[in-house]
Image (tube, grey):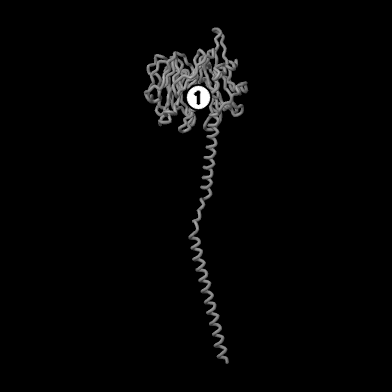
Amino acid sequence: MKKNKKKQKQKKELKVKKLVSKNNKNKQTTRTTRNRTNRRIRGNRKPAVQKKPGPTATASNDQKHQSKQNNEDNKKYFEKINHKYKDNLNFRPALNITKVINEGGYIKLVDLFEVYTSYKDNIDYLALPNKNNLDIIDLNNNKKVIQLKGHEYDIFFVKYYLNNKNNNEYLLTIEGGNTIFVWDVNDNYKIIIKNRNTDDHTLFSCLLVFPKNYNDNFLVVPPIDCFDQIGIKIISLKDGKMVRNITTYYYPYLISWYNEKDNQNYIIQLNGTEIIINNLLKDSKYFESEDNAEYNSGFIYNSNNIDYLCACMGNGFIQIWDLNNKKMIKSFNTNCNLFNIIHWNNKFIIGCEYKYIDLKNHEYSLNIIDIKNEQIISKIKNNAICIKKCFHSKYGESLLISDDNYISLWKA
């Protein structure tokens, strides 16, 4: 009996061992099946994107933000400088900006001072000669931000330029000894050109030109007098050497014109007898007028994709030329001695009038001329000698007007 009980006990233990072994095998098979299934599922999934470390991702976001900010700033800048001025011409004084410091008759020149919006910071600046220094004044708070030194004689000519090829900014100045300075605004106002000319006559016009179809930029210098055999000099900004000259026998008022129709840059001469338009770099003449007129200033504007030249003569005549079709479309007399004209929304001309009384007495006034109706519609007696327009951050559409004492801001 004992033996039978012992055998039965062994059989039970053996069955238990077999069941445990079988269960373990089933579990392993289940795990293996699950693993295989999981591998197949994972194989069908897209690989996980590895996240970049925190600092790199932050730098990328900063770059995107900076790029977006730059685009917004560029948009604001071009909206400002291409602002379409309204027809409101009821000008009234708003602010005396600074006292005019220069002496010696230079005050009566066309480009005695310059007002511009900087591409770098979208701030309005006034570049004003202070004897032989140049003061750069922030028009928003009427404070001087820097003074440029380097001239030996009084400065009487200032122009601002933006190179659209690389957005570099330049200031062009001329001193009493007819030495021309070109200042690189972006390179801490470094002087990149210092061009010396004879001082027989006052050099009252000069240009910087940045051709789109050329990898160099140029300084354009008119002749000093009618006996200058070289004529207009085209000087490279890279090395300061003359690359070509344009023969002329007068000292003209110069205007730069880019013709989109033929992708060429031209130099317009408004001189003592006629209008002459020459190619900047090619030896070819685009146009020459046949009239016998005495031009003293002018400007170019575009309307309905046509480029127009508005030319002013000392005897009061205004001419409008269609440059693309090489013809004069309008000529009228304002019946006053007019000089230093600017345009206002392509409908009006604003210019200074000089009235001679006697050797000791004379008068200046600001005239507003309606181009369509060919007449003066307003005259402001305020001794205006030099005028510039700007879109001021506080006062909006404005004129900067210079008389013998102050530069003042007049809002429209």
- Furthest toward the bottom, the residue is 1
Can see residue 359? yes
**x then y, percent, for residue 163:** 47, 30
Q: Horizontally, is 121 left or right of 228 in the view?
A: right
The residue lying toward the viewer, choosing from 96 and 153, is: 96
Pick the front one: 208 or 369 = 369
**Figure quadrant of the N terminus:** bottom right
Q: Is mark 1 on a helix, strand or loop?
A: strand
The residue lying at 39 percent from left, 14 percent from top is 227
Name the spot of residue 261 as percent of width and height, x first. 43, 28
Camera-nearest residue between 19 and 270: 270
Residue located at (52% from left, 76% from top): 22
Residue at the top extreme, as displayed: 358
Asked where in the image residue 123 lies, by quadrant, the reply is top right
Provide residue 340's location: percent of width, then percent of height.
52, 18
167 above or below 382? below
Q: Name the residue under label 1.
A: 301
